[in-house]
Image (cartoon, rainbow, N blue to C red):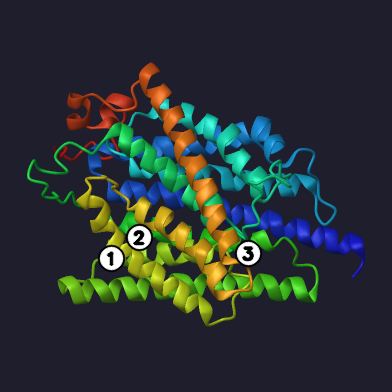
Amino acid sequence: MDENVAYIINTLYVLFSFVLIIFMVPGFAMLEAGIVRTKNVTAVLTMNTMIYAFASMGFLLIGYHIAFGDFGSETMSKWAALLFQMAFVGKVVNIMSGGVSERAKIIPLTFFTVIMASIVYPLIVNWTWGSDMLKDTIFDLNMYDLAGSTVIHSTGGWALLAAIFIIGARKGRYTKEGIVRVIPASNIPLLTLGAFLLWIGWFGFNGGSVGNIASKEGADAVALTILNTNTAGLIGAIVAGGLMLLKYKKLDITMILNGALGGLVAITAGPDLYNIYQPIIVGAIGGVLVVFAVPFFDKFQLDDPVGALSVHLVNGIWGTLAVGIFTDKLFLDQLKGVVVIGIFAFVSSYVVLFVLNKIIPLRAKHDVELEGLDVNECGVEAYPEFKRAF
């Protein structure tokens, strides 16, 4: 194929993938809006909008250069490559913000977004996908992570864990005796819409990461990647739903959807490397892990309204290690990447959040949390005709 034609096709495909990934912005927003109480819906929608805007600008102005240096591309427009990488960055903070919703304030989280998108996440990208400042050092990472089971999902999960340690649980979530108080989702249709928007976005997330579609081999690789991505989501939903039916005799849609998302996170590290059957195993284990991880974190009173620790942190780790189990990539390389990035992501996030919390408290005041962040943080209620639930 003529090089110019291939260049154009690859550019168009990556731009299309960028658009699919941006569908994950309303995906996170709708999922979180559906799962929080009505008094906090506007706040989570505002936070998701701020993340997209500030994370993208931080990465454009500072983060991209840290990650890739003078990185260009001979196979597509460098502007398309920039847009594609920019689409990823906000997802790291989306994972964290959903897990601290209903008690975390918007302004300090926005400051954290800028730091994460401009410095912390770009450094992780540098070591894995980018210019690799750790090359030929003891910390040199040879981990294979096509689209970010660890680079994006686990990083966001570690940041969330750090934030929960600092901010704490929602008021009334756990009793003094350690009993978990169920706080039901406010809008199941919105939650479901959000999960499926994320699922659709994943096809650009993983498929676009292949980078080359302008050849027979490239087209096959992209198609296999998307097929395997979808398979893992399907089996994750099936297994999670089945386990909930066995354990509780109920089909919990929130857990079914989280099972699907867990499968999608797990497959993200290596969908281009597996045959069409291996994703069934990877995604099934992802669904199992979600079902058992949610009560595990509750046992330690780590309050995570959206289940992001279970979906993104646990399955980000599993998905990265799975590449070392089911392919010819070295397991120790995968494990090293998980450990090094995990330590850096958690420690750096904790330090940044700790300092921010001293300057601008991350958590809303008690009465603000009870009344709802919509009134106090945004001045606009999502459901003004409804009586707010305390």
Q: Position of residue 270 (x, y in %)?
A: 59, 67
Q: Position of residue 205 (x, y in %)?
A: 58, 58
Q: Which mark is residue 253?
A: 1
Is 389 situated left or right of 240 in this image?
left
* Spatial CA span between label 2 and label 3: 23 Å
| One can see residue 42 in this view | no
Q: Position of residue 4 (x, y in %)?
A: 90, 59
Q: Give the residue at mark 2.
A: 192
Residue type at mark 2: give it. Answer: Thr
Q: Residue at x 52, y 40 (%)?
A: 344
* Spatial CA span between label 2 and label 1: 8 Å
Q: Position of residue 3 (x, y in %)?
A: 91, 62
Do residues under tags 2 and 1 come within 8 Å of each other at their CB atoms?
yes
Q: Residue at x 60, y 43 (%)?
A: 124
Q: Residue at x 61, y 66 (%)?
A: 330
| One can see residue 178 in this view | yes
Q: Nearer the viewer, residue 205 or 49?
A: 205
The secondary structure type at the circle numbered 3 is helix
* Spatial CA span between label 3 and label 1: 27 Å
Query: Which numbered disc, 2 or 1, marks the residue that appears first in the sequence?
Result: 2
Image vertical order of residue 364 relative to residue 297, above or below:
above
